[in-house]
Amino acid sequence: MPRSQAAAFETTISGQLRREADLDLLTRLASGAVAYFVFLLLLGTTTVYQHDFPRLFWWCAAAIFIASGMRFALTALFRRRVSLPHRMVIALTAISVCLSAGASGVLHASALWRYGHNNWTFTVTMLWVVGIASGSTISFTPNFRLLLLHISLLFGPVIACSLVGITQESISFVAATLVLCAFLVAQGYRLHAMYWNLLKNRAAETRRTAELQAAKAAAEAAHEVLRFQATHDGLTGLYNRSEALSFLEREISRNARKREPISVLMLDIDHFKQINDTYGHFSGDDVLRAVARTLKDAVRSYDVVARYGGEEFLIVMSGCDEEETQIFAERIRATVADTGIAVAAKDLRVTVSIGAVSADSVPSQRELLLSADEALYEAKRAGRNRVVTWSKNQTQMPAEGVSAFAAD
């Protein structure tokens, strides 16, 4: 992979990783915020918490509810592929963390201040704090700094409140809380590293897959080029002789099974050597390409046109009897004769001689080609610019066409 493409790929992967991490963070935070809100309502409506701190309780509940709404809104925008600056996402997420964790920390501190360390209500509150904080370690794994902010806002007010009136119980509580904070930070750091290693490995796998797909596409393109070169003529773009003969052999077998006639037209550009001698070989190549385009446009989509060799062309048709073959060949001859070719600032008119053969029985490839070649020889011997149809009884020659070579 070229350096420019590799750099672009790295930028794309980096953006995808950041977006994936942000989306994962917001999804986890949204579910965690719901747990905060539900547990807070459960705690407040089943204890004296709400009665003792009615205004504070509902202000904190409103703050957590707003934080939940912010996270759900950001998650919905991300899932809809709305492009948001990374700094804006982190800033809004940090604000929602401050609202939810800060509100919880203030409520816990107020409970500690009101009920003391030995009251069952405070015990229930701290059990809830420990459970939610442990779960938030996983929730905040994609962004370690937000994890630290969450733990600080959650436990900071409680620790500060405990240190106001220092007692044996408060010192024990603070020590246990600090141990819990250290455990959560260590666990969050470890999971944070594991999470980003997983994303990096996924990015490396994505890159390897992309490189393999690019290599496969390049190999298929090279194979297609080689196949085209092996089956097509380099000058005219038509099928080459070997591919035309292979197709003819397949058509003979298919038509034999379906009992359909098969026709072969062998064409030769009249006085082509004179064109080369008069205008040069490059102009002769232009004439070959122009005639090839005319022939390809004149046949049906399922007929095969090939450059047989030099200035000779071969057309293989299916389902045409002798009369239809004669009409078809005459139309091709007239089309070539009426088509002007720009050569050396002149409108050159060229003609072709055509030998046609149509067989109802099952002929061999050699028989078909020899018959078409014999009919072509008769057409050229009779004056060129005409169609001669070969038959078993005799060679049929129509009236002469226009002059074989003319330049206006």
Image (cartoon, grey):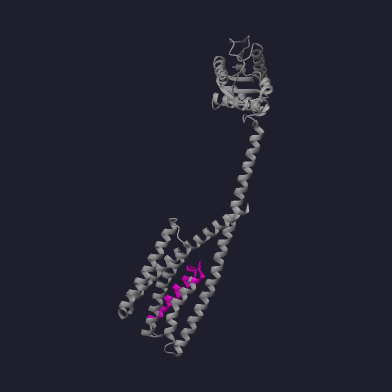
Q: Residue at x 67, y 22 (%)?
A: 278
Quick check: is 133 in the magenta stretch?
A: yes
Vertical position of residue 302 compared to residue 61: above or below: above
Residue nearer the viewer, 376 or 29: 376
Quick check: is 60 in the magenta stretch?
A: no
Q: Residue at x 49, y 84 (%)?
A: 175
Vertical position of residue 123 compared to residue 261: above or below: below
User: Residue 235's image quarter?
Assistant: top right
Residue nearer the viewer, 220 or 309: 309
Q: Is residue 77 visible?
A: yes
Looking at the rendered image, the quarter that the C terminus falls into is top right
Q: How many marks?
A: 0
User: Residue 222's image quarter?
Assistant: top right
Image x and y of residue 146, in percent: 48, 71
Residue nearer the viewer, 83 or 374: 83
Image x and y of residue 277, in percent: 69, 22
Image position of 86 (left or right of 57): right
The main secondary structure of the magenta stretch is: helix
Boundaries of the magenta span:
121-145
Image position of 29 (left or right of 272): left
Image x and y of residue 6, in percent: 60, 55
Image x and y of residue 117, in percent: 41, 85
Image position of 348 (left or right of 65): right
User: Residue 41's image quarter?
Assistant: bottom left
Q: Is residue 250 visible?
A: no
